[in-house]
Amino acid sequence: MAVEASAKPFLNDLDEDDDAPLIFRRSGNSSSKQNQVNQEVKKPSSSSQNSNGQSTNAQRGKATVPSFKAPAEKSPIGSPKASSSSCKVATVKSPVTNSKASSSANVQPKQTLKPNASGVVKEEINSVKIETKSNVDDEDSEDEKPLNSRIKGISNSANKGASEPAPVKGEDSDDDKPLSARYSVKPTSGSLSGKPNVSIEKKSLASKTQTNGSTVKVKQQSSSVVPAKRPMNKADSSDQSSSKKLKLSDASASAKVKQVTVKPVAKADDDDHLPISQRMKKSVASTSKSSPAKQKAKKVVSSSLKKINKKKMKNSKYSKSSKMMPSATDGQKKWTTLVHSGVIFPPPYQPHGIKILYKGKPVDLTPEQEEVATMFAVMKDTDYMQKPKFLENFWADWRKLLGKNHVIQKLEDCDFTPIYDWHQQEKEKKKQMTAAEKKALKEEKLKQEEKYMWAVVDGVKEKVGNFRVEPPGLFRGRGEHPKMGKLKKRIYPSDITINIGKDAPIPECPIPGERWKEIKHDNTVTWLAFWNDPINPKEFKYVFLAASSSLKGQSDREKYEKARKLKDYIDNIRAAYTKDFTSKDVTKKQIAVATYLIDKLALRAGNEKDEDEADTVGCCTLKVENVECISPNMLKFDFLGKDSIRYVNTVEVELPVYKAIGQFQTSKKPNDDLFDLLDTTKLNTHLKELMPGLTAKVFRTYNASFTLDEMLFKETEDGDVAEKVVVYQQANKQVAIICNHQRTVSRSHESQMSKLSEKIEELKGVLKELKTDLDRAKKGKPPLKDANGKQKRNLSPEAIEKKIASTNQKIEKMEINMRTKEDMKTVALGTSKINYCDPRITVAWCKRHDVPIEKIFNKSLLAKFAWAMDVDPQFRF
DNA sequence: GACCCGACTTGACGCCAGGCCG
DNA sequence: CGGCCTGGCGTCAAGTCGGGTC
């Protein structure tokens, strides 16, 4: 399948002067493989556990190996899995099974990925996740591919879109066009839709252009037209034909190019670009706030908002939190008065007295030793049990507690099954509680926590985010984290620093006889409390206000405003980096190529990492082995990014970029830095010269929001709400793909799919029978007997035809459902919605199209985005 | 300019409740 | 009406990036 996306841009005259336009053309298709990400593979799941080891979940994989031995005698409840074997702990040294084994063993759907030949992923092997996938290259299935690759076709479109290609005008090749016209950049990313149908390209420029913000203020920022486009993503699909080119014609852009610096592209009144209808709307909107459209729109959101606000205010003597906060201009000050109750601690450990077996005999443990043993025991079903590093680190820390001379000398001779079984029983008991009991428990907890849930900031009652101190447990690092399995010790009040207003009462320490480490009154920061991370003492764990707070909302808004501002600069920035692709100054060249990758592929900046962290990379830390040059101008990326999520993507790039990468790789070892002269500080310093406040991550926000806005604008058609919601989801999906937001395939995915296909088969059987009956009915014969030999009712041919039609519909519906499910099984929509898509785009779209905002944002998001609810319906990113 | 510290955002995942469907 | 699925929510790990220091 294809999926490939490659968009390929070409650049024409590269070297030329500044004015040279870059053109991205789409190539026919590139075929490449794609990226994949693997999905499933991902993480071992970890279960969470609470302090007492109540953790939960089982993981998906069963551990084959190790750790627990089964005590033959008792295996009471045991989880089914457990039953199968007892697991004994594998010794550290002998990793027993290796991951492969485990993976194979696993039930889970996850498949392993295999690294490709290129060996890019170096370590992949280790990580379970990775392995799963099998050859990437070969596979066709999209699942395996990285999200981006799935975008298929899009690429071009994307690009185009992004660049705003001007469809309008020209369609054809850029070559003919004047430079300036060609100049557009292409965006890259664009992946848009997974579905090909949605082609963006077709739309006219005009439609693509954005209007600018509705409000006057906003207006300034937005500039005009700039078609900024998104990057494209990769591939283009074949479907899209190659024909279109995107180009932007922005004269201004070309002009500006020269000044490498900043300046936004022309703003002008951009109405010119807008379609007339839009302009009209715009003017109306901007002039009067109460334009009908707006009012209506308001309604769309108002009710839910009201509810939320009401709630917030209810029972509160504090003023309501304003959606708009004053901007943080006044220096660094984040608040004037701050009152809160501190943090709440997990309950102390309650020993259960269940003994583990050592060489088959029960062993007495002190409560402290037992607590840690319990943390380990309850993780039996997780993939961590197969990881030698996890076992090694756990054993090192546990052994410290046991003492050198303890009876227990080897982890592999320990059998934790009794504790595991006890834990399963406890879980079961909890499950069996009646609804009333559960409710009572919940209320009790709420009562205890109530006071910690709120803070009063400048007179406004605001929700606190994570007021619960993290319980002790075993560290669950992602990927191949060197510290996985280490004991994350319990945090006490004496570890905690509280930050509170000078005149506010100091929160009472919840543990009698103990006291806080320190009390601060620092109003230049937003944290309410912090403690040092027990795993990495130089790091901190902070307690912040919840996402719904004004403080967070304000910074969220600022983030999106900055991204919007990038729109005004993007053409120049793209022109500038394009020019530098061929710079003789290698540092400049590296900066240019890195910026291009960040813009086009939405890569993260890639800070340096310590030895004691998982080995993952971002743009600036890419290794030579992470990028493979495929002639004539494709690049195949394969690396582990944040959270050890694999990024695999093959993209067509401008020839100068291709050549530059080849040059950067020359005479380096696979593990050397591709961008050896670069780091995130240098990169960001450079970006700031192009636009105030610009950093690498702004490109992600920009490309994500831009894509959402474009897709919603272009793809929304008349229809019912459900249809519009689907359009939204598709747009959201594209954004998720661009950002490579993946999720593991749900454990029941396979079975769900097979159930669905069984049903479809069944319906098809019914259909066949109906057809037979129809033939017979037409000839005046009675229907055949049914499967049970019973005579069926005699129906008229018309009635049978009706039945056939409805059955066909059912089948179709199920097939669509199945496809969507399969399609989305590895794509996580939530992250982009929460962090990358400017909520104003969504709210304005809902208002314009009469879609109740609740269909898109849940309660939490409505609260988090309260600041965006009164946006003008004509708002465009 | 290399570190390091510090603050804050981003991100995947687990659990649970509530809704859906047969 | 009971089991299954999904979405909401919380958790906590893992990024980004600015600023200060030497």
Image (spheres, coloured by chain):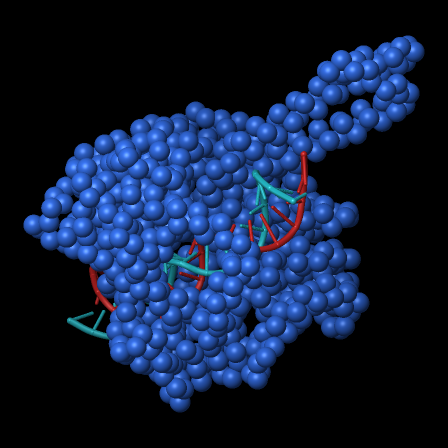
Chain colours: A blue, B red, C cyan
Q: Quadrant of residue A754?
A: top right
- Residue A706, placed above or below residue A412: below
In front here: A596 or A215?
A215
Asked if residue A762 can be seen in this view, the reply is: yes
| Residue at x 76%, y 16% (from the top left corner) | A786
Apparent side of residue A527 relative to residue A823 in the rendered image (left or right): left
In front here: A601 or A21?
A601
Residue A504, position as x, y percentages in the image: 41, 86
In front here: A434 or A204?
A434
| Residue at x 70%, y 33% (from the top left corner) | A813
| Residue at x 31%, y 31% (from the top left corner) | A85
Residue A722, position as x, y percentages in the image: 72, 47
Q: Quadrant of residue A271?
A: bottom right
Given the current orientation, which residue lies at the most extreme bottom position? A503
Residue A848, position as x, y percentages in the image: 73, 58
| Residue at x 66%, y 22% (from the top left corner) | A761
- Residue A163, placed above or below residue A847: above
Given the current orientation, which residue lies at the most extreme left position? A405
Apparent side of residue A359 relative to residue A607 in the rendered image (left or right): left
